[in-house]
Image (cartoon, helix red, strand yellow):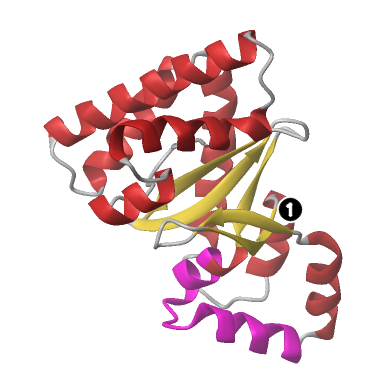
């Protein structure tokens, strides 16, 4: 199962997501969706109360919303509750928010863009540039980031060609990073204050 983690942008707010190549669909962070639609300072508590008030929703979420690894704001990977488009639409029905309909349209656009990007990879880079600009990054930072993504992709493509399993990519990356920096990838990111943002895949 190949999963690609990304951060989508809805009205200047981040929504973590994972593209599942096997199922060919997005999984979105439920808590990020709740936060976007409710502006709650504690989306975890808000969602917990939602499920408590609505047993049917609680049962649906338990059956249809798996826990998937996504990046935290500190750059660590942790499992969080996630839902595909159908599941997110069901959850949205239980949230009284004027943003509900615009958010549904946005999700449809995200899905459509992914199909277009699979047919034309350059569109994926263009989307990343636009997202970075919306987040306020300088052109120089964006250029460096895109170059690093391209280098990373070339490296992983070569590893695949040599028969390296994807589960070994992180280990190889750690070895490379430790060789020139003396730190693991995680330690180096913490040292530099770097956080994975948009369309970054490990």
Would you name the residue on which mark 1 appears?
86
Q: Main secondary structure of the magenta part?
A: helix
Q: Quadrant of residue 130?
A: top left
151 left or right, relative to 140: right
Q: Which of these two is toward me, 187 or 193? A: 187
Q: Which of these two is toward me, 179 or 91? A: 179
Q: Is residue 153 above or below residue 73?
A: above
Residue at image point 13% right, 39% down: 138
Q: Quadrant of residue 40?
A: bottom left
The quadrant of the rendering that contains the N terminus is top right
Which type of secondary structure does the marked residue at label 1 adopt? Answer: helix
Residue at image point 67% right, 59% down: 82
- One can see residue 98 in this view: no
Q: Residues within 10 Å of mark 1 (few under 14, many from 20)?
A: few
Q: Which of these two is toward me, 54 or 157? A: 157
Q: Is residue 43 magenta?
A: yes
Residue 96 on image: x %, y %: 57, 78
Q: Is residue 18 above or below residue 150?
A: below
Residue 37 on image: x %, y %: 49, 70
Residue 175 on image: x %, y %: 47, 33
Q: Quadrant of residue 18?
A: top right
Residue at image point 56% right, 30% down: 114
54 left or right, relative to 131: right
Residue 73 on image: x %, y %: 40, 62
Residue at image point 41% right, 16% down: 122
| Residues in magenta, as a range | 32-53
């Amino acid at each position: 199962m190949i999963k690609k983690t990304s951060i989508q942008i809805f009205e200047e707010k981040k929504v973590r997501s994972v593209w599942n190549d096997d199922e060919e669909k997005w999984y979105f962070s439920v808590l990020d969706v709740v936060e976007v639609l409710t502006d709650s300072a504690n989306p975890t508590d808000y969602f917990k109360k939602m499920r408590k008030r609505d047993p049917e929703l609680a049962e649906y979420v338990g059956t249809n919303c798996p826990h998937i690894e996504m990046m935290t704001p500190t750059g660590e990977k942790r499992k969080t509750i996630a839902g595909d488009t159908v599941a997110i639409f069901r959850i949205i029905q239980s949230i009284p928010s004027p943003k509900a309909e615009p958010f549904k349209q946005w999700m449809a656009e995200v899905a459509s863009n992914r199909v277009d990007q699979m047919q034309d990879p350059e569109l994926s880079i263009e989307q990343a540039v636009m997202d970075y600009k919306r987040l306020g990054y300088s052109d120089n930072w964006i250029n460096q980031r895109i170059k690093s993504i391209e280098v990373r992709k070339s490296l992983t493509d070569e590893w695949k060609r040599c028969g390296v399993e994807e589960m070994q990519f992180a280990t190889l990356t750690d070895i490379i990073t430790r060789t020139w920096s003396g730190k693991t990838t995680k330690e180096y990111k913490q040292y530099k204050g770097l956080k994975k943002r948009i369309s970054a895949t490990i």
